[in-house]
């Protein structure tokens, strides 16, 4: 049975800390809905109404485009080990662009000032609803470790190569929405 909460509780925090993966879902008013898996190594709980993750360069930048267009964002955690549960965080998201003051402050405060290889931006979710559900239908999986393919790919590209790649692949969504990645406009305070 689903239960709803206004904020993250200590039980929710403990559950999140045990997970190895989360999913991010976003959409604009039109176009495709995007769902992306992420490792929890770059996920942080800021407070009982705010979470954030350090987003790395990838093949697309759908979440940023959807946040520019609409702002809605859902983060979902599933228990693949242990007791079953699904935890969803609903709210409004925003992007802190790499190189900006808000990005630097968030990086310093919640990521010990360290970026992983190939950073792109930080995504912040202002949570307006927390929902848990049973998770009985989620299969059991054993975590064997993290993949290093993204690290190796980003290292091979180098800083300049990543910028070229981002300009080629990360400035528009697959539906043509701008991501704001290199815009002069400030998307840190939008939505």
Image (cartoon, rainbow, N blue to C red):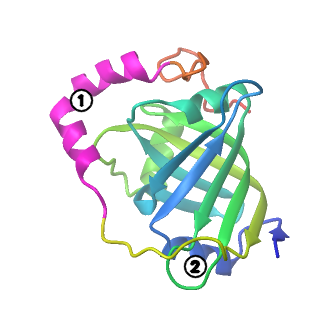
View extreme (left): residue: 156
Measured as percent of width and height from the top left, residue 107 is found at 44, 49
Above or below, 94 relative to 169 = below
Q: Residue at x 24, y 29 (%)?
A: 159
Question: Residue 177: horizontal and vertical position, in percent?
Answer: 61, 18
* Secondary structure found at label 1: helix
- Give the left or right position of residue 17, taking residue 169 as reference: right
Residue 118 sits above or below residue 60 on the image: below
What are the residue bounds of the magenta stretch? 146-171
Drawn side of residue 19 relative to residue 156, left or right: right
Q: Residue at x 74, y 33 (%)?
A: 191
Residue 151 among magenta residues: yes
Label 1 to label 2, Cα distance in Å? 36 Å
Identify which residue is drawn at 69% across, 61% down.
88
Q: Residues within 10 Å of mark 2 (few under 14, many from 20)?
A: few
- Residue on which disc 1 sits: 159
**Residue where numbered disc 2 is placed:** 14
Query: Tag count in the figure?
Result: 2
Residue ID at (66%, 39%): 26
Q: Secondary structure at mark 2?
A: helix
Q: Nearer the viewer, residue 135 or 6?
A: 135
Q: Is residue 127 left or right of residue 5?
A: left
Depth check: 55 or 144 in front? 144
- Image quadrant where residue 66 sits: top right
Q: Pinpoint residue 129: horizontal percent, then vertical percent.
A: 80, 59
Is residue 172 part of the magenta span, yes or no? no
């Amino acid at each position: 049975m689903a239960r709803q909460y206004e904020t993250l509780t200590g039980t929710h925090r403990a559950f999140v800390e045990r997970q190895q993966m989360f999913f991010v879902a976003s959409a604009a008013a039109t176009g495709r809905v995007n769902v992306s898996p992420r490792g929890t190594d770059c996920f942080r709980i800021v407070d009982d109404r705010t979470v954030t993750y350090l987003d790395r360069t990838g093949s697309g930048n759908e979440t940023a485009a959807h946040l520019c267009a609409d702002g809605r964002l859902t983060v979902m955690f599933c228990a693949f080990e242990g007791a079953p549960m699904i935890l969803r965080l609903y709210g409004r998201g925003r992007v802190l662009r790499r190189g900006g003051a808000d990005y630097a402050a968030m990086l310093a405060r919640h990521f010990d000032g360290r970026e992983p290889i190939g950073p792109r931006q930080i995504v912040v979710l202002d949570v307006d609803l927390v929902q848990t559900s049973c998770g009985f239908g989620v299969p059991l999986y054993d975590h064997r470790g993290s993949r290093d393919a993204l690290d190796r790919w980003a290292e091979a590209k180098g800083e300049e190569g990543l910028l070229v790649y981002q300009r080629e692949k990360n400035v528009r969504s697959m539906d043509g929405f701008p991501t704001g990645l290199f815009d002069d406009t400030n998307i840190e305070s939008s939505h």
